[in-house]
Image (cartoon, rainbow, N blue to C red):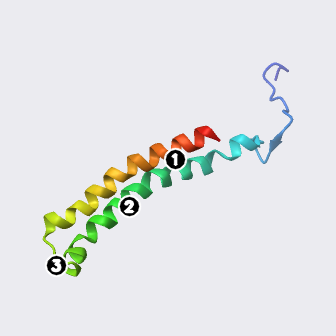
Amino acid sequence: MSSRLAPKLVKGLDRGGPLMAPAAQAQPWRLVALALAMLLPSLGTSIANVALPTLAGAFAASMPQVQWVVVAYLLAKPVRERVSREHANND
């Protein structure tokens, strides 16, 4: 076998794979954080929708009257996100 085709020893190999830099090791946690950031608002809306019949019964209100709770929740989310973004940019 020629030296050109022989495998080269590379510093930084551990158990057959390259050592990862700290930033590369944090990638799975970033993916989990992104997944939760996408899941939780949907989950909150689903919880509000599931609670509608209970709210209607507790307040003796019709379903269209109680649906305003979900509409208000959905309208408050972008406002809250905008305020949070502006606050984060100012710090």
Left or right of 81? Residue 54 is left
**Which residue shows up at 16% across the image and 65% down it?**
65
Whether residues under marks 1 and 2 lie with C-beta atoms below 8 angstroms apart, the answer is: no
Q: Nearer the viewer, residue 56 or 41?
A: 56
Residue contact between numbered discs 3 and 2, judged by CB atoms under 8 Å: no
Quarter of the picture containing the C terminus is top right
Q: Amino acid at mark 1?
A: Ser
Q: Is residue 8 above or below residue 37?
A: above
* Residue at 15%, 73% in the rendered image: 61
Q: Amino acid at mark 3?
A: Ala
**Residue located 44% across and 50% down the image:** 80
Residue under label 3, please give it.
60
User: Which sits earlier in the primary sequence, circle 3 or circle 1?
Assistant: 3
Q: Residue furthest bottom?
A: 58
Q: Are marks 3 and 1 in contact (CB under 8 Å)?
A: no
Q: Nearer the viewer, residue 86 or 46?
A: 86
Residue at image mark 2: 43
x then y, percent, for residue 21: 76, 40
